[in-house]
Image (spheres, rainbow, N blue to C red):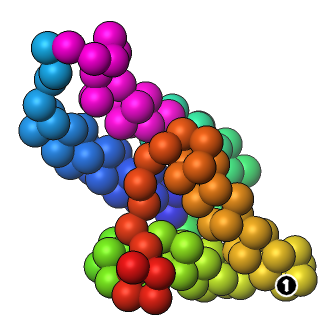
Amino acid sequence: MSYLLALAGIIITTIYYWGIQAIPQLSMGDPLGPRAFPQLLCIAMLFSCLLLLLEGRKKMASRPALSGSFTPVLAALVVIALYFIGFKPLGYVVDTTLFLLLTMGWCHPKRRQAVTVAILFPIASWYLFRELLDVPLPGGLLFS
């Protein structure tokens, strides 16, 4: 299971990196350029996929063969696809809150903590990006 999620992460990261290459390099301004932060995200995502592969390897050694159910993987991919589709129309805060409520509610055993994080994380990260780093995020129909 974790191998499939890591493979999906690597594919998404590859597509994301390919998209980064379309960002034009500026001849003046920031010495790192506009590609630096997205490339850093690619490195972090690949590192996360590597950790997921290592975790899956340890778990596979300690348990019998999997039942072969791809339902959780497909459900995760559908939720991620819905997150990407709803990003612009719903905006960052609303879409990320819904995404986290779904995924953390599904995976996290402590519901109160999951709901708290699902509500506070999008607001805190929006503030960080929008106010401190001056990176605009989609406001969606509610906040435009």
| Residue 33 part of the magenta segment | yes
Whether residue 17 can be seen here: yes
Q: Secondary structure at mark 1?
A: helix
Query: Residue 102 magenta-drawn?
Result: no
Residue 83 location (% of width, % of height): 41, 76
Q: Position of residue 48 (x, y in %)?
A: 54, 40
Left or right? Give the position of 51 relative to 37. Answer: right
Q: Please give the residue where the numbered disc 1 appears in the rendered image.
A: 111
User: In the image, residue 32 lies at what x, y percent?
Assistant: 34, 15
**Residue 70 spot, x, y in % from top left:** 42, 78
Q: Residue at x 44, y 37 (%)?
A: 41
Q: Magenta residues?
A: 28-44
- Which residue is found at the position 71% from the left and 84% from the top? 105
Label 1 neighbour load within 10 Å: few <14, some 14-19, many 20+:
some
Which residue does the image show at 51% across and 63% down from the upper left?
A: 1
Return the residue nearer the eye: 68 or 120.
120
> Nearest the camera: 101 or 133?
133
Residue 72 as seen in the image, left or right of residue 113: left
Observer able to see residue 68:
no
**In the image, 73: left or right of 102?**
left
Up-down relation of residue 20 to residue 34 (above or below): below
As shown in the figure, which amino acid type bears the numbered disc 1? Arg
Q: Residue furthest bottom?
A: 142
